[in-house]
Amino acid sequence: MNKPTLKEQAHGEIERIFRILLPQNGLAVREEQITLCHAMLDTLLQNKIALCDAGVGIGKTYAYLTACVLLKRFFPSPQPVVVSTSSVALQNAVIGEYVPFLSRIFLENRIIQKPYGL
């Protein structure tokens, strides 16, 4: 039996995060969110650009932040990941809510070794 590639491992983590870890922490499983995260990770791995149209409430922010974290975990690079938001309110939510929430869960489950901060 072959060992999974890093890409396969990263995609497996997406499944674990969105189907197990986030629901254990109060979030619902959203298939569109999982699909979006997979697509974002693939786009980042290919160093390409993706234009994604996703409806309100599917969890876009968690999807793209998770893809970015997994990119850095499985494919470390000195290049930073830059996230641009459409509003200052979303920027503040990313910094004050989304990143700390994900960081706590990812630390507890050894997905990352140190807290993420912006």
Image: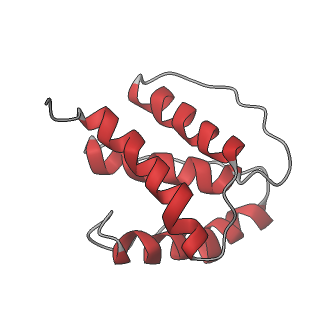
Q: Position of residue 64 (x, y in %)?
A: 58, 47
Residue 102 located left or right of residue 60: left
Q: Position of residue 6 (x, y in %)?
A: 25, 37
Q: Quadrant of the N terminus?
A: top left
Taking depth in this image into account, of 61 and 87 the one nearest to the observer is 61
Taking depth in this image into account, of 76 and 88 the one nearest to the observer is 76
Task: State the scheme by which the image is colored.
Answer: secondary structure
Q: Position of residue 35 (x, y in %)?
A: 62, 37
Taking depth in this image into account, of 5 and 1 the one nearest to the observer is 1
Residue 48 located left or right of residue 7: right
- At x 33% / y 48%, what residue is drawn? 72
Image height check: is 84 above or below 28? above
Image height check: is 41 above or below 84? above
> Total number of numbered labels?
0
- At x 49% / y 67%, what residue is drawn? 21
Q: Position of residue 88 (x, y in %)?
A: 77, 63
Residue 89 located left or right of residue 13: right
